[in-house]
């Protein structure tokens, strides 16, 4: 092939490559682009969704599958025929470095550890107890996260109600100020009344700004837990939990109590296993040896069976046993204290719910009377029968009554949520 033909060949190949690149680019332009960005999490709309989002981000939830795998592997290991895997032993002996008369010896053996009496059964019992304790520990962690989420959720609802009330109060004072300004221009009211009305508007604006700042802080705290900002929906439609109206006491099935009860079982079985493990595991060794005394001699093969029995642990074993018993006693004491604490907490939550219901009934009655009085004084103010200070005072009393009703409703819902928390119930 000549140089000119080589040049034409390279040009032909280059043209084909460029054509393929342009065809590929055109095909990609015509086909829809594949977006690989992760899907954005949907904004939670109620307490249960916020809790689920918060729990999914916790280290306990992320590591739970691996911990369950470890527990199953531990159970399988406790059911094995030997406490540890068998070991292979190999050795080689020769006189090649000194006399070099042809002596050699090859030794190969297998060492198998053995369970101590009742050690296998106790190990299986301990691994089963640890698997159960893992689930109760996870449930207790869920309940602790639920307490944090509930506190942040109701703090956010309180702040949201404050914002709504502040906006309504600002709207009402602005209407009063507009009416006062109109009547001032008409000569019905003095200029000092207009200043007083404008001052009330300024105070309402300041209160709204403070309420919005508190609402933003509470929202950020809730977003830090759930990973995404919640939607400010209707409180009655997605935030109120059902009140366990029956006189139920879940002290024994409470997640915190169950966690400690399972810890007690684990500690007791660990102490029982430690008492059995008074020495290291014995071993059975099967060895074969093939040796030769000198050059020209026939090789001889022998077999040996050996048993290795360690002595007792003495003071070390006594220290481990005493420590295991102390751990079991400590967990049992914690269990008794936790039962007493939960009983007191459940009774306090029940009283708080009843008190909130009584307060709500009284606040609703006061708000109803305040609304009627506001209507009466608003009409008389428009007719010129009531002065501005009285009208502003009535408006402030009505706004305070409405604010009290809204906040007590939140407090009642929060009290019910606290009661469910004390009973060990997750958000719903």
Image: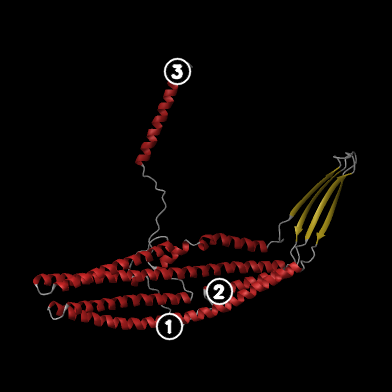
Q: Position of residue 393 (x, y in %)?
A: 23, 78
Q: Residue at x 45, y 18 (%)?
A: 5
Instruction: Identify the element where label 1 is drawn.
Output: helix
Q: Is residue 21 above or below residue 394?
A: above
Q: Quarter holding the C terminus?
A: bottom left
Mark 3 or mark 2, earlier in chain:
3
Residue 10 lies left or right of residue 80; in this view the side is left
Does the rendering let one see residue 179?
A: no
Q: Position of residue 378 (x, y in %)?
A: 17, 78
Front position among marks 1 and 3: 1
Q: Position of residue 417 (x, y in %)?
A: 42, 74
Mark 1 or mark 2, earlier in chain:
2
Q: Residue at x 54, y 60 (%)?
A: 65
Q: Residue at x 78, y 66 (%)?
A: 312
Instruction: Identify the element where label 3 is drawn.
Output: helix
Instruction: Identify the element where label 2 is drawn.
Output: helix
Residue under label 3: 5
Disc ID at residue 142: none
Asked which quadrant contains residue 320, the reply is: bottom right
Question: Which residue is farthest left?
Answer: 186
Question: Which residue is farthest top?
Answer: 2
Does the rendering let one see residue 326?
A: yes
Q: Position of residue 67 (x, y in %)?
A: 57, 61
Residue under label 2: 258
Q: Is residue 116 above or below residue 396?
A: above
Residue under label 1: 351
Q: Residues within 10 Å of mark 3 (few under 14, many from 20)?
A: few
CA gap between label 3 and label 2 equals 87 Å
Front position among marks 1 and 2: 1
Asked which quadrant contains residue 130, the reply is: bottom right
């Amino acid at each position: 092939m000549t140089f000119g033909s080589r040049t034409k060949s390279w040009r032909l190949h280059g043209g084909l490559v460029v054509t393929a690149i342009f065809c590929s680019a055109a095909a990609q332009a015509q086909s829809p682009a594949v977006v690989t960005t992760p899907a954005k999490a949907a904004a939670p709309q109620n307490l249960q969704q916020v809790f689920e989002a918060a729990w999914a981000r916790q280290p306990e939830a992320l590591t739970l599958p691996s911990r369950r795998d470890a527990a199953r592997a531990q159970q399988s290991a406790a059911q094995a025929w030997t406490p540890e895997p068998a070991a292979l032993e190999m050795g080689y002996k020769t006189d090649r470095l000194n006399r070099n008369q042809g002596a050699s010896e090859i030794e190969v053996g297998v060492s198998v550890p053995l369970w101590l009496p009742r050690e296998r059964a106790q190990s299986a019992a301990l691994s089963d107890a640890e698997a159960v304790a893992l689930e109760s520990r996870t449930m207790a962690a869920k309940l602790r996260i639920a307490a944090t989420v509930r506190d942040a959720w109701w703090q956010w609802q309180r702040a949201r109600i404050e914002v709504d009330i502040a906006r309504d109060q600002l709207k009402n004072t602005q209407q009063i100020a507009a009416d006062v300004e109109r009547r001032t221009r008409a000569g019905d009211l003095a200029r000092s009344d207009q200043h007083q009305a404008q001052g009330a508007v300024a105070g309402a604006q300041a209160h709204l700004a403070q309420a919005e700042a508190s609402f933003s802080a509470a929202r950020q705290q809730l977003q830090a837990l759930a990973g995404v900002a919640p939607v400010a929906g209707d409180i009655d439609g997605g935030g109120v939990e059902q009140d366990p109206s029956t006189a139920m006491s879940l002290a024994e099935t409470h997640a915190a109590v169950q966690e400690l009860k399972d810890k007690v079982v684990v500690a007791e079985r660990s102490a029982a296993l430690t008492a059995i493990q008074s020495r290291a595991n014995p071993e059975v060794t099967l060895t074969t040896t093939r040796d030769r005394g000198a050059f020209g001699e026939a090789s001889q093969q022998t077999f040996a069976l050996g048993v290795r029995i360690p002595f007792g642990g003495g003071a070390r074993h006594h220290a481990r046993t005493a420590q295991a018993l102390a751990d079991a006693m400590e967990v049992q004491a914690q269990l008794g204290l936790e039962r007493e604490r939960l009983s007191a907490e459940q009774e306090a939550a029940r009283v708080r719910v009843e008190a909130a219901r009584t307060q709500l009934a009284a606040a609703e009655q006061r708000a109803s009377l305040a609304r009627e009085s506001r209507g009466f004084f608003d009409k008389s103010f428009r007719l010129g029968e009531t002065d501005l200070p009285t009208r502003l005072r009535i408006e402030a009393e009505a706004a305070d009554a409405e604010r009290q009703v809204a906040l007590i409703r939140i407090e009642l819902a929060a009290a019910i949520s606290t009661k469910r928390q004390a009973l060990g119930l997750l958000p719903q």
